[in-house]
């Protein structure tokens, strides 16, 4: 069964109505009441690998289907009771490239199939029609509507927003689909839906003067034959072709279960080792823990930034899937011992037993770096309030204690540019 009918449904409706009325009139005028005219429409499709447009007989079931096309046309030319009225071509592409790429690709696929057929069969130009090819949004919607995939409803909501012909709306849809449930939804679409949209179709419409018996054998699911007898009173019959359900069934991916490990690159530039973990606890919520550690001087004793910091946090993402803009709240405990070359004092939390305690809020943005969603980049900045209880030492080797202070600090407490690796990403596409 082909799934391209929504592409040409509007074209077929008008001429089929006229054709059916015309056949009924001719039948009545010539007195063919013993043998009813019938209209046959045969749809045969060929598939294409991603980003390719040349017809490949060795791909998928194309060899059988291409042979079916030539057999069908040869049969019509040799059968005096069968007359071809029209041969139409259509093309389609999957949705993952956007309109700017897919519309030209669809047209190339259509023209490639037309060129292949015209090279194999002697068809007059008056019978051949090429219709506008496009990204098959209506076909995709039909596939989702007929599917029992638990995420189908939410995907339909997204692709019904905006206009199919507006590139900005299409790009927005694709961006939302890519990030749904940390990329799991996108991987299901790429595996179970998109391959069946990368195709071109030929539709052969013929009129027979006897009851036809389809004899064309091709791969199951690739050909649909519709036979319509002209009744005594003209009745226009318009059929609909349902899309086949996805080849793979999958339960609704949960909006949780992702694990992330990341590290702050600028902190490594300061010789501060660091590692952070994050767990996607819900569709837009995550919890995480960051550790920072440094125990050395920067070349000399009067220049150092020794620290040990533990920083738990909770995040809220504006978009599902652990990507995009997020807001976070955090707590922190930080031990410190630092001095700057040329500075008068070295500062250390009192006795090494009174770390800075506090917390704050922050904002950041995460974006994917790899197509499978495993590698990502993240930028974040935060501010907080902390209670400080520290000693001041003269900044020299074994410098004496110069004072002790307590105060409250309010200001910047985080600046990070991190590389993120994702576990449980759901496998590669």
Image: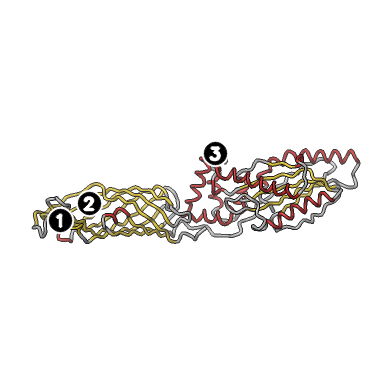
Rendered image quadrant of residue 166:
top right
Percent position (x, y) of residue 422? 42, 58
From the viewer's side, name the closer residue of 48 and 42: 48
Q: Which of disc 1 and disc 3 is earlier in sequence?
A: 3
Residue 215: numbered disc = none
* Pair 3/2: label in front: 3
| Horizontal side of residue 324 vs 401, given as left or right | right
Quickly name the residue at label 3: 166
| Horizontal side of residue 334 vs 101, given as left or right | left
* Pair 3/1: label in front: 1
| Horizontal side of residue 179 vs 5, given as left or right | left
Secondary element type, mark 3:
loop
Quickly name the residue at label 2: 386
From the viewer's side, name the closer residue of 304 and 9: 304
Estimate the spatial distance between the alpha carbons at disc 3 and disc 2, rounded to whole Å.
50 Å
From the viewer's side, name the closer residue of 281 and 271: 271
Residue extending farthest front: 119
Secondary element type, mark 2:
strand
Q: Residue at x 72, y 44 (%)?
A: 88
Estimate the spatial distance between the alpha carbons at disc 2 and disc 1, rounded to whole Å.
25 Å
Percent position (x, y) of residue 50? 58, 52
């Amino acid at each position: 069964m082909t799934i391209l009918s929504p592409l040409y449904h509007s074209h077929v409706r008008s001429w089929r109505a006229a054709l059916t009325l015309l056949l009924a009139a001719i039948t009545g005028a010539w007195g063919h009441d013993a043998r009813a005219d019938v209209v046959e429409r045969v749809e045969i499709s060929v598939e294409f690998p991603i980003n390719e447009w040349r017809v490949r007989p060795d791909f998928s079931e194309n060899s059988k289907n291409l042979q079916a096309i030539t057999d069908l046309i040869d049969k019509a030319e040799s059968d005096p009771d069968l007359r071809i009225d029209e041969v139409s071509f259509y093309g389609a592409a999957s949705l993952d490239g956007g309109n700017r790429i897919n519309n030209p690709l669809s047209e190339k696929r259509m023209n490639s199939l037309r060129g292949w057929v015209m090279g194999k069969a002697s068809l007059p130009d008056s019978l051949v029609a090429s219709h506008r090819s496009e990204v098959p949004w209506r076909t995709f919607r039909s596939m989702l509507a007929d599917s029992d995939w638990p995420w189908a409803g939410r995907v339909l909501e997204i692709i019904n927003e905006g206009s199919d012909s507006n590139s900005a709306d299409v790009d927005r849809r694709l961006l939302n689909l890519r990030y749904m449930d940390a990329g799991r939804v996108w991987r299901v679409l790429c595996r179970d839906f998109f391959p069946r949209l990368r195709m071109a179709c030929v539709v052969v419409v013929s009129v027979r003067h006897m009851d036809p018996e389809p004899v064309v054998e091709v791969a199951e699911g690739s050909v649909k034959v519709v036979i319509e007898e002209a009744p005594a009173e003209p009745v226009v019959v318009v059929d609909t072709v349902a899309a086949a359900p996805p080849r793979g069934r999958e339960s609704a991916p949960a909006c949780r279960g992702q694990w992330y490990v990341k590290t702050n690159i600028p902190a490594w530039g300061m010789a501060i080792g660091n590692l952070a973990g994050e767990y996607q606890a819900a569709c837009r919520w995550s919890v995480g823990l960051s550790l920072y550690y440094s125990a050395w001087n920067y070349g000399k004793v009067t220049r150092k930034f020794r620290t040990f910091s533990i920083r738990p946090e909770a995040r809220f993402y504006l978009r599902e899937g652990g990507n995009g803009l997020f807001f976070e709240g955090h707590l922190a405990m930080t031990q410190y011992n630092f001095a700057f070359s040329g500075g008068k004092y070295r500062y250390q939390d009192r006795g090494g037993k009174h770390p800075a305690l506090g917390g704050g809020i922050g904002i950041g943005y995460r974006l994917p770096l790899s197509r499978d969603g495993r590698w990502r980049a993240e930028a974040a900045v935060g501010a907080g309030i902390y209670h400080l209880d520290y000693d001041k030492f003269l900044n020299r080797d074994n410098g004496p204690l110069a004072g002790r202070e307590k105060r409250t600090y309010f200001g910047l407490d985080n600046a990070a540019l991190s590389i993120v690796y994702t576990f449980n990403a759901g496998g590669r596409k």
